[in-house]
Image (cartoon, helix red, strand yellow):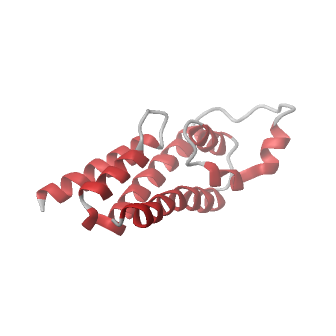
């Protein structure tokens, strides 16, 4: 039981930190967890998703602590993309920037949360599905 808790705590921490500006590789951590502890299954996906979503929301929050974005010629293009761009919040480096920009531009919380959650959770579901198909986890 303790070993299982350690796996999940490590997975959560890695996923959380990976969603901030700190380096990390939550995909590799999830694959390792599913490989060495296949009984974790959906629980591992849920824990990684929760950690990564909370890390992304922390980055959005920190972006909101910055001074309001100045008017600039590139701003309307970014505003036009809006919270939907957070479907890409899982992409390394770019996703961290998108989360910070979402906060900096003060995009509304509900759509930010919706698209951020969708982007991050779908990535882990795809990884799990590939693991199930290729490695019989």
Residue positioned 78% across, 42% down in the render: 78
Q: Camera-side residue: 69 or 53?
A: 53
Quadrant in the picture for the N terminus: bottom left
Provide residue 5's location: percent of width, then percent of height.
19, 57
Q: Camera-side residue: 133 or 123?
A: 133
Q: Camera-side residue: 126 or 94?
A: 126
Provide residue 42's location: percent of width, then percent of height.
36, 68
Q: Quadrant of residue 96?
A: top right
Residue positioned 54% across, 61% down in the render: 122
Residue positioned 61% across, 33% down in the render: 66
Provide residue 9's location: percent of width, then percent of height.
26, 52
Provide residue 131's location: percent of width, then percent of height.
41, 61
Q: Quadrant of residue 46?
A: bottom left
Q: Is residue 109 above or below residue 41?
A: above
Quadrant in the picture for the C terminus: bottom left
Question: Residue lying farthest right?
Answer: 73
Relative placement, left or right, of 135 versus 127 is: left
Q: Is residue 127 above or below residue 17?
A: below
Residue positioned 40% across, 66% down in the render: 132
The number of callouts visible is: 0
């Amino acid at each position: 039981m303790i070993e299982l808790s350690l796996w999940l705590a490590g997975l959560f921490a890695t996923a959380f930190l990976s969603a901030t500006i700190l380096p990390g590789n939550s995909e590799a951590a999830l694959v390792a967890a599913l490989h060495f502890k296949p009984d974790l299954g959906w629980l591992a996906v849920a824990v990684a998703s929760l950690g990564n979503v909370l890390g992304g929301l922390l980055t959005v929050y920190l972006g909101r602590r910055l001074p309001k974005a100045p008017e600039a010629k590139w701003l309307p293009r970014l505003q036009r993309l809006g919270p939907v761009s957070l479907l890409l919040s899982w992409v390394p480096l770019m996703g961290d920037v998108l989360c910070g920009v979402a906060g900096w531009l003060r995009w509304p919380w509900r759509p930010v949360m919706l698209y951020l959650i969708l982007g991050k959770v779908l990535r882990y579901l795809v990884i799990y599905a590939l693991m199930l198909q290729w490695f019989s986890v």
